[in-house]
C-alpha cells in the first residue's frame, strides 16, 4: 500500500511544489504525495522552469491551502521551510514529521541569472533529500 505524504511550505509556490514533483517522479509507486501551503499563492514560473530542465512537468500543479487536507491521515508530514514547521497544523494519526529547511528561492534577488542559480540550487538540494528519503523509507 502506498504511503501518504504531504509536503508543506509557506506559499506552496516553489519549495513544496518542487518537492511534490520530484517525489512523484522518483517514487510514484511508493507514495501518494500532495503539497500545500499555509498562505497559498500560485506556482512560481521559475519553479516550473527549473523542474522542466530535469524533465519534470509541474505546470499543471496548483497552489493549495493546507486546510484542504486537515482531516486526512498522512504517513509523512514534511515541512520545507521554518515558517511552515512552526505553524504546522495537527493531522490525525501518527504520521512522522520531517523538517528540512531550504532557502526560499522566491526571495532571491539580483539578475535573472543569479535568481535562477538560487532556484537551481534549491531544486538540487530538495532532489538530494528526496532521494535519501525514498531510499530510507519503506
Image (spheres, grey):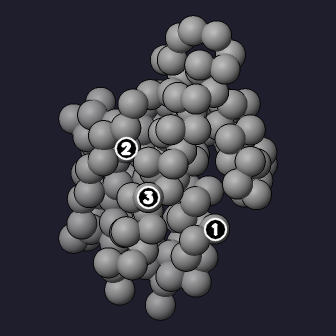
Judged from the image, the secondary structure of the residue bearing numbered disc 2 is: loop
- Name the outermost residue toward the top: 110
- Total count of labels: 3
Q: CA distance from mark 3 to mark 2?
A: 13 Å
Query: x, y (%) of residue 27?
Result: 55, 76
Is the C-beta separation of discs 1 and 3 under 8 Å?
A: no
Residue 101 appearing in the image: yes
Which residue is depicted at the point 74% across and 48% down? 53
| Residue 103 appears left or right of 116 | left
Image quarter for residue 63? top right
Above or below, 123 relative to 7: above
Camera-nearest label, 3 or 2: 3
When the figure is inspected, residue 19 is found, relative to residue 105, above or below; the finding is below
Q: Residue furthest bottom?
A: 1
Q: Please indicate, yes or no, whether residue 87 appears anywhere in the rendered image.
A: no
The Cα–Cα distance between marks 1 and 3, rounded to whole angstroms, is 13 Å
Question: What secondary structure is marked by label 3?
Answer: helix
Q: Quadrant of residue 24?
A: bottom right
Q: Residue at x 64, y 10 (%)?
A: 111
Disc on res. 80? 2
Whichever of callouts 1 and 3 sits on the residue coming sooner in the sequence is 1
Q: Are marks 2 and 1 in contact (CB under 8 Å)?
A: no
- Which residue position is annotated with label 3? 128
Q: CA distance from mark 2 to mark 1?
A: 18 Å
Q: Earlier in the sequence, mark 3 or mark 2?
A: 2
Above or below — where is 89 with respect to 107? Answer: below
Quadrant of the snapshot with the C terminus = bottom left
Which residue bears the numbered disc 1? Answer: 25
Residue 100 image offset from top left, x and y in percent: 30, 47
Across and down, in percent, residue 97 comes to: 24, 59
The dot on residue 94 is none
Amino acid at each position: 500500500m502506498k504511503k501518504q505524504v504531504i509536503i508543506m511550505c509557506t506559499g506552496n509556490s516553489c519549495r513544496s511544489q518542487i518537492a511534490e514533483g520530484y517525489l512523484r517522479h522518483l517514487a510514484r509507486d511508493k507514495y501518494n504525495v500532495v503539497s500545500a501551503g499555509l498562505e497559498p499563492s500560485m506556482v512560481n514560473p521559475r519553479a516550473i522552469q527549473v523542474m522542466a530542465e530535469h524533465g519534470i512537468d509541474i505546470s499543471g500543479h496548483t497552489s493549495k491551502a493546507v486546510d484542504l487536507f486537515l482531516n486526512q491521515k498522512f504517513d509523512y508530514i514534511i515541512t520545507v521551510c521554518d515558517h511552515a514547521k512552526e505553524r504546522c497544523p495537527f493531522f490525525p494519526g501518527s504520521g512522522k514529521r520531517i523538517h528540512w529547511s531550504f532557502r526560499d528561492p522566491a526571495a532571491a534577488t539580483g539578475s535573472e541569472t543569479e535568481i535562477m542559480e538560487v532556484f537551481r540550487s534549491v531544486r538540487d538540494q530538495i532532489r538530494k533529500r528526496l532521494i535519501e528519503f525514498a531510499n530510507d523509507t519503506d
